[in-house]
Image (cartoon, helix red, strand yellow):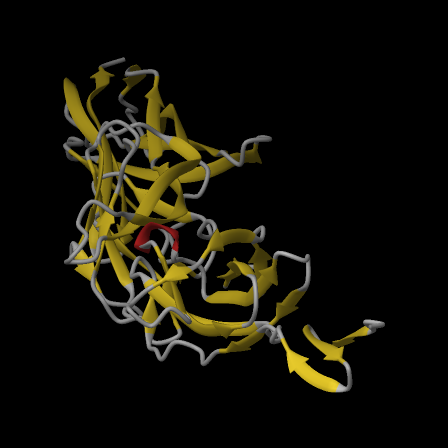
Amino acid sequence: MLLVILVLAVGLGYLYYYEGYRISVGTPLIITHSSPVGPFFVAHQITFQATVTGTNLNSVILTYRLLQWIPSAGAFILGGWVSAPMFIATTDTTLYSYTMPASEVSGSTVQYQISASDSSGNTVRTSTYELAVGDFNWDSAQTSEVVAVRTVTSQVSLTLNQIDGFTDNVTIKIPNSPPAGVSITPVQSQVSPPNAVVLQITSTSDSQLVQRYLVEIDAVYSPVSLSSIQVIRRTNLVLTVTDFGLTVSPTYAKVIRPSSSVNATASYVVTLSAHSGFTVPAGFVTTVTGLPSGTSWTLQMVSYAIDSSGNAQTTYKLIITVRSTATVALSQFDFKISASIQGTTVSHNVSGLQLDIVSS
């Protein structure tokens, strides 16, 4: 008997015909999948499931990548594609599953697709799906310049963005040291985005003067159920610590008391140095105390200059006028310059300046 067998491929299944009878010996690969139901959050695992049927099934693969939203850039950073095998999850031998570890769930979007292959090399794929992942990030990679004046306590507010509904508490940490004599502490150690992170900056009178010094500020998140996992978002505080300086020279001046209505004078050179970033909206206040009776003082500006580092230097002439009524004596006096900054008075004082009034 002549045996004729005709083989036809239909989709991914196979149909055999024997003496006019249709015999099905293969079924096509079919993936039935519904996206996991959220909400999803960074550092929390996500489980993917799919029902896969078909003859000679060889493998089921989940392929995914992470898209991280960077608020400061207004754009996504695309991660590389990762492939992971899916396995039978239950007694249902057609149900395949894969759980993405919590340590890998980050960014603001997970893109994925599922593919199935048989032993003959045939492959079917789902469409590409996207899952929104709740996350958080700083508004920028670094702040604008923050100016702190020695001895003046100040606060700065940093924006911590909420992404796709993330509302858990994050811990604010400062891993590296600020300049010597400067302390930077969060007003609240834990903050829930989108609430602002407020940092308090204090400094001593002799703290290190710096210009655009970078202090790393970290927002750290650890899920309650997985404390071993830490998600860290970093920004840099751009810090300038500034002040002004004061010198007076010479420290001793001698003047002959006049015997007539023509007054005598003694002069001192006052140098006021304002370091980079130092500003005084209300100006400086100058006081001279301890001068003897029969004298008075005036201050005249001589020069003003700013160097390449932004430091300003102003030179004044302090003129002490001595009248004929002044007492002949060696007197000591103090010269002080003050500035009001954020409700705090910052002063520098030169004490023990000497004025020697002698008779003719």
Q: Does residue 76 show up?
A: yes
Q: Is residue 187 left or right of residue 301?
A: left
Q: Position of residue 336 (x, y in %)?
A: 24, 36
Against 285, residue 131 (above or below) is below
- Identify the image quadrant of the C terminus: top left
Q: Which residue is depicted at the point 39% across and 74% down? A: 164
Q: Is residue 324 left or right of residue 141?
A: left
Q: Does residue 263 show up?
A: no
Against 306, residue 2 (above or below) is below
Q: Which residue is depicted at the point 59% across and 56% down? A: 78
Against 2, residue 58 (above or below) is above
Q: Is residue 258 left or right of residue 87?
A: left
Q: Nearer the viewer, residue 3 or 42?
A: 3
Q: Position of residue 144 (x, y in %)?
A: 47, 52
Q: Which residue is depicted at the point 33% across and 29% down? A: 246
Q: Nearer the viewer, residue 188 or 252?
A: 188
Q: Position of residue 104 (x, y in %)?
A: 39, 52
Q: Position of residue 10 (x, y in %)?
A: 74, 79
Q: Which residue is depicted at the point 36% across and 40% down? A: 216
Q: Nearer the viewer, residue 354 or 287?
A: 287
Residue 175: quadrant of the picture = top left
Residue 299: quadrant of the picture = top left
Give the residue furthest to the front.
1
Q: Nearer the viewer, residue 200 or 295?
A: 200
- Identify the image quadrant of the N terminus: bottom right
Disc count in the image? 0
